[in-house]
Image (spheres, coloured by chain):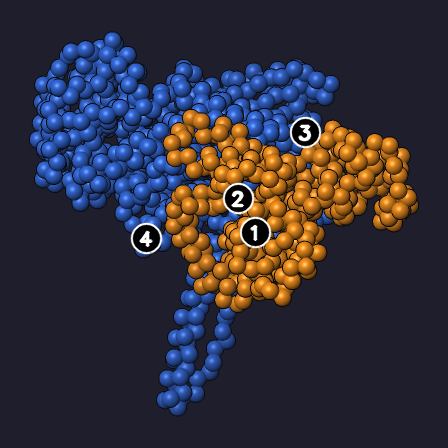
Chain colours: A blue, B orange
Amino acid sequence: VENVRLLDRLSSRKAALGTLYLTATHVIFVENVSETRKETWVLHSQISSIEKQATTATGCPLLIRCKNFQVIQLVIPQERDCHDVYISLIRLTRPVKYEELYCFSFNPKLDKEEREQGWKLVDLNEEYNRMGIPNNYWQISDVNRDYGVCDSYPTEVYVPKSATAHIIVGSSKFRSRRRFPALSYYCKDNNASICRSSQPLSGFSARCLEDEQMLQAIRKANPGSDFIYVVDTRPKLNAMANRAAGKGYENEDNYSNIKFQFIGIENIHVMRNSLQKMLEVCELKSPSMSDFLWGLENSGWLKHIKAIMDAGIFIAKAVAEEGVSVLVHCSDGWDRTAQVCSVASLLLDPYYRTMKGFMVLIEKDWVSFGHKFNHRYGNLDGDPKEISPVIDQFIECIWQLMEQFPCAFEFNERFLIHIQHHIYSCQFGNFLCNSQKERRELKIHERTYSLWAHLWKNRADYLNPLYRSDHSQTQGTLHPQMAPCNFLYKFWSGMYNRFEKGLHPRQSVTDYLMAVKEETQQLEEELEVLGERLANLQKSQLNGTKVKSKQQDRSKQSGLSTSSNSLANTPQEYSNDLKSFPSRSPSQGDEDDSALILTQDNLKSSDPDLSANSDQESGVEDLSCRSPSGGGCLPSEDSGKDSDEAVYLA
Amino acid sequence: MLRSSQPLTGPNRKRCREDEMLLGTVLDKGERGFIIDTRSAQAAKQARMTGGGTEPKSSYPQWRRLHRPLERGRQLQESFMKLVEACNDTSATMDRWLSRLESCRWLSHVKAALSTACLAAQCVDREEATVLVHGAEGTDTTLLVTALAQVILDPSCRTLRGFQGLLEREWIEAGHPFHLRCARSASSHARPKQEAPLFLLFLDCVWQLSRQFPFSLEFGERLLLILFDNAYASAYGTFLCNNEKERCLCKVKENTHSLWAWLNQPAERTKYLNPLYSHNPLVIWPSVEPQSIQLWQGLFFRWIRSSQHLDEAWAEIQRLVENN
């Protein structure tokens, strides 16, 4: 469709005119401006809703909201075209079969072996070995090898030594969805562990010998403690209500030596609504501070984040400080349980704060334990009531921790944002379906590519320059400040306003410091080489030999001057009062960030837009940081010209 | 950019030829200028009853007046006190934290101050027009706006030396009544009289700028905290009295030491430098969206939360830059 306008959300004055394309996998908007031909690519999988708004004199507005919080406002001149686009998008964004998803056609031009290697990058067996298992207390069990016991669990589960197959099977019959207690994390320093399950089918008075034995087995696997905590992450009222449906929670009278604890994290429906409300606040035009703070509080979002974090802290404390094992569950043990177990593990074990370790963590507590990615994130068209930002909340908890402990993580904010992006993008096969069983049936490993391999390849973009494995912050357990701590929870504008570049610090400290680090390393290497040459020279001079001094080939200075980060920026609309006053400056042809819009221009090492526009402040100095983006830009593989030719940004 | 106090128009709409001529000298024939009045239109009008007022259009035809009400005086002090109280309340739950923060209105004041300063800067830089800033007395919100606008516009004000010069010029010499305004801080139980944290509000705004433009200020948060401390209680004479006249009468320069002299000693100075600084010759336009304005934790939670991890991060940044 031609002559479509793409509006800027913050400033309705700025609209780009161009052509809109719909392909099998993407919506693409190409600007008419001939020099730059800026392109906006959006994957259908990313689109969460499309809204046709009332036709105005200028055309028919179409609002596209994405799961990665990008909001695109288009104005299509003809009503009929708009309707066609709308109907098409409705169909395209509600795939019925997995094969319709991008991951099955995405081609990064790797051969079969590379694809396989990519999938092998994260190996959970290795991970449990790293933890120290199998050992005297824990073993691997193949009782679920054909998914015969629990179809949402993996084929390989880790259980206490004293848990026989009989006990496991018996316990699984007493647990919602057959999700019996299994190991999530084992602390070899004190034998305390974190196990996870779903709620017991206890109703008001039902009992199950094998389930009780299962919990005893967990307790016995930790000789340092004579009881275990059982943590129910639901609000007490909800758990009690479940009893009427024949489910519920563990009765301390029936299970010997447990201490039961409710933590009170709300359910997926509450969270879905909470996010919705928060996004509404983000869409307010020129909100006052009041509007914003009230709206944010009203959504309850940060309160929920804190609740998840508090649960993780409780469990980490139980394991690290008390040396007591914990069994965690919610209702079905695949949402809140996953969040809380993975937060706790990350607090406890510095390995999960490394890049590789974080991938392993997600693979372990989310992918292998059957978090319902398809239902929660809408790979396929499904029940809207199943949609909920569960993993988004977990990712945000990690960001909040990164803000409190800037040296403690090997990876940076961009890593988290890209992971979130790809959970919804369906460009890679990691987060498809609802369980390992479904993924194996679809032969995901043979037909799609692994995100982890892709991220690992580009890991230089995701490093935190402040991380040092020998730093005090990176050792041992993290101890987030407890009360008072409400103020520590910040609104994550890097995620929820990701595409509104005007909001963010224009200069990326992370990128600059990475460049500094790199240059220092290069210089140090050069220094070493020169030192060696000098030594040789001196030696040969001593020997009286004449040595022809070689031409020093200066390894190229990376050109990181001290003044390398001045970026022109434009004022936002501070006042409408100035508009009627004839402005003498040339139109605010602002230098859009190329990163605002996913575009293949990101491939170039310098930002082309800054020089192209006539902003009178553009005395822009050379930006010699490696990644030109202010942070939101993705490696452009989903924005390549042909959908077949994905290009990787080094 | 000019600053003054309000014209004494009074209820009878007095005119003053000299004042009109003075303002006339800064504009060329046919040029237009802006007046930014930091009172609401209502308040400015009411001021006439007590002898003050605004510049009437008829007498100052080349000037266009814009009203940008900024909080001052008792209200601002109370906002400050409420905020400090909220921050120190260890019993507050997450449920009510944001609304409590909102009810203090402090962040709204920060937003308003930044917006107004940006407006003044925009007049100068984008519209290439002269701007006159005044409130009532010209000693509080006026100085907030002009000083902040200069940090936004002028890279030399963002250097350590230049910033000190700015403070001397736009706050101290310009006659901000430090003695009255900073007599008591937020925790005092005594009834506030003339106290108002305008200077703190200015420092908060500068902190917001440093957060949004981490490379563009030669100094860091540490300097801002030291300035805050010294405005209220100091071993140095720099922030004493209310104006130059009083300082002369009290012989401040003869009897006390200057804060700047101490700060600028080589050993001290390095503590206040921003390791990420690199000269940015351009104007820095901050975002004043609510998401972009944050609570200055380093100040308001200074004694409540440990800054250890953040300090370590800064030390690491310093190390990385120095190694290079």
The residue labelled by disc 1 is B231
Task: Quote the CA–CA distance across marks 4 and 2.
Answer: 37 Å
Residue A48 in percent (x, y) is at 49, 23
Which chain letter goes with mark 1? B
> Residue beneath label 4, please?
A472
Q: Nearer the viewer, mark 4 or mark 3?
A: 4
CA gap, disc 4 to disc 3? Answer: 48 Å
Which circle marks residue B185 in the picture?
2
| Mark 2 or 1, nearer chain start | 2
Of badges 2 and 3, the one in the foreground is: 2
In the image: residue A181, left or right of residue A383: left
Residue type indicated by callout 4: Ser
Q: Secondary structure at mark 1?
A: helix
Q: Residue at x 27, y 47 (%)?
A: A476
Q: In the depicted view, which residue is nearer to us: A559 or B292? A: B292
Specify whether disc 4 shares its chain with disc 1: no
Residue at the image position 43 percent from the left and 70 percent from the top: A527
Which residue type does callout 2 highlight? Answer: Ser
Q: Marks 4 and 1, Cα distance to the nearest angstrom? A: 36 Å
Q: Residue at x 35, y 40 (%)?
A: A481
Find residue A205 and report its image quarter: top left
CB within 8 Å, label 1 to label 3? no
Does B41 sit above or below residue A527? above
Q: Secondary structure at mark 3?
A: loop
Residue beneath the point at 34% across and 41% down:
A480
Task: Specify the amino acid type for callout 1.
Answer: Ala
